[in-house]
Amino acid sequence: MDRPIYITPEGLATLRAELDHLWKKERPEVVAVVHWAAGNGDRSENGDYIYGKRRLREIDRRVRYLRKRIEDAVVVRPEEQPDHSRIFFGATVTYVNSRDEEKTIRIVGEDEADSLNGKISWISPVARALMKATVGDVVTFRTPAGEDELEVLEISYPG
């Protein structure tokens, strides 16, 4: 991997919870269904068996992915950023764009990004444009429709 896997403590906890759920709850349930279905004879037409095996592969693939991400994650505590007047990883930022639309976003790790809830990845074009900006700065970034300008209105960090 070329770049570090930055993540907030909350994001790491979410990944660990998903891994725990898959490994300790969902996978054993699917294994039990597959075991039961395998005992029913012909596996080629046994929907429970076929679906169960497919779901088991999906779970195992996701578990491998989560374990690797958790192992390689670099936890960044936003409240420990040295300069709260600038935008860095973990900052919550309110800005206004050139269409006079005000938005509030939080800059988080790739695994935590959820644009519907205002969480954007630190490698997204908006986050990259905003990095190191201060309140009052106007930054420009490229969109598919052309260039857009964002004026930083507020910066905050949790805690």
Image (cartoon, rainbow, N blue to C red):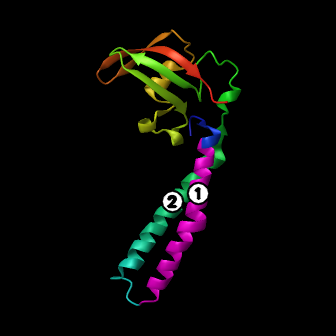
> Helix, strand, or loop for circle 1?
helix
The prevailing secondary structure element of the residues shown in magenta is: helix
Give the image location of residue 116, x and y in percent: 41, 37
Instruction: Identify the image quadrant of the N terminus.
Output: top right
Residue for badge 2: 61
Give yes or no for residue 31 being in the magenta stretch. Answer: yes
Give the image location of residue 15, x and y in percent: 58, 50
Q: Which residues are magenta?
A: 11-40
Residue for badge 1: 19
Q: Please give left or right for residue 103 compared with residue 86 in the image.
A: left
Circle 1 residues within 10 Å: few <14, some 14–19, many ≥20: many
> Helix, strand, or loop for circle 2?
helix
Count the marks: 2
Instruction: Looking at the picture, tell me which residue is in the foreground, 142 or 1.
Output: 142
Q: Please give left or right for residue 30 compared with residue 141 in the image.
A: right
Can residue 104 be spotted in the picture? yes
Say which residue appears at 31% left-offset and 24% top-offset. 144
To which quarter of the image does residue 86 belong?
top right
Amino acid type of the residue that numbered disc 2 sits on in the rendered structure: Arg
Say which residue appears at 35% left-offset and 82% top-offset. 44
Q: Is label 2 or label 1 in front?
A: 1
Instruction: Looking at the picture, tell me which residue is in the foreground, 60 or 27.
Output: 27
The answer for how far apart the CA atoms under marks 2 and 1 are is 11 Å
Can residue 122 be spotted in the picture? no
Say which residue appears at 57% left-offset and 61% top-offset. 21
Say which residue appears at 46% left-offset and 62% top-offset. 58
Amino acid type of the residue that numbered disc 1 sits on in the rendered structure: Leu
